[in-house]
Amino acid sequence: MRTPGRREWRVPDASGRAAGPQESLTPFLGEGDSSVVTASNRTLYKLPSLDSQLTPCRRQELPSQLELCLPCCQGSFLTQEKGRRKKKMKLGRVEFCHFLQLIALVLCFSGMSQAELSRSSSKPYFQSGRSRTKRSWVWNQFFVLEEYMGSDPLYVGKLHSDVDKGDGSIKYILSGEGASSIFIIDENTGDIHATKRLDREEQAYYTLRAQALDRLTNKPVEPESEFVIKIQDINDNEPKFLDGPYTAGIPEMSPVGTSVVQVTATDADDPTYGNSARVVYSILQGQPYFSVEPKTGVIKTALPNMDREAKDQYLLVIQAKDMVGQNGGLSGTTSVTVTLTDVNDNPPRFPRRSYQYNVPESLPVASVVARIKAADADIGANAEMEYRIVDGDGLGIFKISVDKDTQEGIITIQKDLDFEAKTSYTLRIEAANKDADPRFLSLGPFSDTTTVKIIVEDVDEPPVFSSPLYPMEVSEATQVGNIIGTVAAHDPDSSNSPVRYSIDRNTDLERYFNIDANSGVITTAKSLDRETNAVHNITVLAMESQNPSQVGRGYVTITILDINDNAPEFAMDYETTVCENAQPGQVIQKISAVDRDEPSNGHQFYFSLATDSMNNHNFSLKDNKDNTASILTRRNGFRRQEQSVYYLPIFIMDSGSPSLSSTNTLTIRVCDCDADGIAQTCNAEAYVLPAGLSTGALIAILACVLTLLVLILLIVTMRRRKKEPLIFDEERDIRENIVRYDDEGGGEEDTEAFDMAALRNLNVIRDTKTRRDVTPEIQFLSRPTFKSIPDNVIFREFIWERLKEADVDPCAPPYDSLQTYAFEGNGSVAESLSSLESISSNSDQNYDYLSDWGPRFKRLADMYGTGQETLYS
């Protein structure tokens, strides 16, 4: 089988210009491409394009007959096999080029359009001990340009078998990738065509299989062979920045050549073929500040000392162009945003050389006097500052700190100001960067100073006490009117106004103390009791005589000293029991005592039986000398039937001066005890109960009785609540009770809705009181005629009658309440002024004077002034 191509062959000369007839050795497929021109079992020539550089040959995927690869001349090489012998040609490059051109010209002029690879002409050959058998197929790769846009199918190549005699008995079939869908073959001639547009970036090559079949028997006449169709690249893809747009940052004041960022563009074209994927970079926008490396895409600074304070951001446009940047290449662009980051290259500077502030002398300690700020063009940590007072006469009076948020210097007071002592202060304040950059110290000192003058203003200050706290002591036995102590205050102003004293009664509610308004002497006003209140904390007010609004406050602590004025007593209420089987000398109770007094040497109590119990035959007392005493039995055989309770008077005396004593009674109950001496029951009545009832049964009976009592109380309570009038409902306040009537009146003509006589007539018959939870029923009474009497008598009688009703009202609240009544009196001499009543009456009164009252009464004058005819005129 042979593989000639139906293409126009051209052999370029040494200058690159095509020469010779339309058929030559090398198909002109593109830059850098090499293709098989013709093949035979004798000689094979292969020429790449002439514009490629002089490089060593690459071994191609050629049939096994091609053995020899010679050095290239202008990108060409020659492989030769003749017969069964091989002969290596060793020529110089120039001589070989001339020789190759000569052969090409001879072949062109001889009119050879294509050479056939004939199976019949090939003969086996032998090579130094090896034998090679002949082959029926001689193959090489087919090459097809991508992106073919023609209307006819693109011719790829031709398949031919030596068995094919041209009589139509052989047919060719194609299988593999893209067979029938992309590539079709003429089964008679073996021509292969591409029916679709091919894209190398989608698939670079296709592997297919070809076979020659007998048309009649459909059996293969040759073994199936495999070949490859490679898609040849063209420059149809522009470079793309897959990671763009870019952002980058560099410090300001960076030197020239500082690397900013590297941009990378990718080209989908074949990087191994030509220059379609060889990209170069250039900068379209951003000069002269930045530059870009053409091959690497690294962006660098091109100008020194770029200042962030002047311009902090730059927008660059970078272009990537293939074909090594030559004309006709495709290009793509991306943007790069470069931000200059801040460095500490600007020192702080005060906008003014001096400042002055006025502050009142009454300003409290820790108050803010002033805020000053040094300007710094830097930002962030580079603008952080520290302030300090470096000189001045207010070093101990004022201090300065920095506000972390605003970087302001805050001047505050450390000590109280006194206008009478000093009227002004001068401070010299320095501001410096917290972290200076050594690279920029040559630009000057990174600090600045300013002068702050503080003027103290005089204010009318309240009186000041000589001491912030006055501690005093007084015995609780002191007499009323005795002097406890003295406080003193003065006016700090230059006027030195006299001071008057008083006690803040909110701190002395019981008014135990008095103070002399002029001298400040504090005396007792009541008897004092340490056990009630041991310490009194009072506030003394001092106010200026000339300006009472200026008040100073002093604090006095009065401690009440103790005297022995309280007798000792039992420390607790003891519940003492003695068993019926107690033995003589048995301790049944240990007692102690307490005393509300607090002697300086502590308490010492003495215990003994009272004088009338000294000869007690049942119990005895033992003083333990440790402020406790023990109660012991003096006999045995205590019986509840004889005596269930014993009362033992005990005498207790303290060690005060003078000593105080008291007699306390200890109650002792006789109980039935178990074997361990634990009391079980102490009631004498237990003996008279039936023997069959146990303690548990008694408790159950008592519980049932209590339950019945509770139920009875609940029933009685519920019945009482039902009988109570509803006016005492807990949800309503009887003192502010509002009765609401959802009754709409019918206007002035409606005389049935409400009888006004109830308010005017004192003698109207009144019904008895009704329940307030029922809607009141209105009694319709005729309006009687009243005789005119003096108004004061009418009102007096009306109020007196209502007062008597409230006194006898069973539903009135049991406390004083305010009764409000609306009483109009017995009537008016002018009678009713209702327009509705006037128009329906036969009154002869003349209303013509209404027309003289102005435009506001015009409507009334029209209605009543001249009669009925004016109403409808």
Image (cartoon, grey):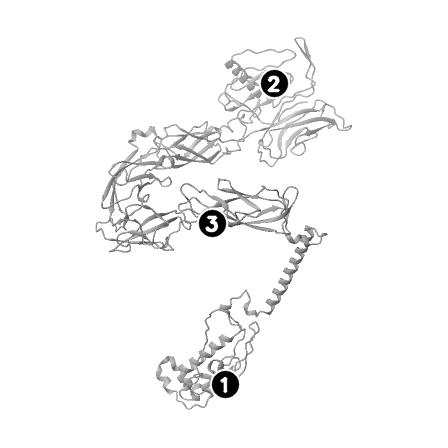
Q: Which residue is mark 2?
A: 44
Q: Residue 115, position in %: x, y? A: 63, 21
N-term mark: 2 or 3: 2
N-term mark: 1 or 3: 3
| Picture layout, residue 712 above or below residue 342 | below
Q: Residue 691, position in %: x, y? A: 71, 52
Residue lying farthest to the front in this orientation:
615
Which numbered disc covers residue 83? none
Count of marks placed on residues: 3
Mark 2: which amino acid?
Answer: Leu
Mark 1: which amino acid?
Answer: Arg
Badge 3 element: strand
- Is label 1 in contact with label 3 (beta carbons under 8 Å)? no
Q: How far apart in space, not on screen, are marks 1 and 2 (Cα)?
A: 147 Å
Q: Nearer the viewer, residue 264 or 843?
A: 843
Which numbered disc covers residue 783? 1
Q: How far apart in space, not on screen, are marks 1 and 3 (Cα)?
A: 84 Å
Badge 2 element: strand
Residue 577 relative to residue 129: left or right:
left
Residue drawn at x 67%, y 26% as measured from the top left: 159
Question: Mark 1: few, some, or many residues within 10 Å (few <14, many ≥20)?
Answer: few
N-term mark: 1 or 2: 2
Mark 3: which amino acid?
Answer: Ser
Residue 470 relative to residue 638: left or right:
left
Question: Mark 3: few, some, or many residues within 10 Å (few <14, many ≥20)?
Answer: some
Which numbered disc covers residue 662? 3
Question: Mark 2: few, some, or many residues within 10 Å (few <14, many ≥20)?
Answer: some
The quarter holding residue 7 reads top right
Tell me the quarter of the image containing the N terminus.
top right
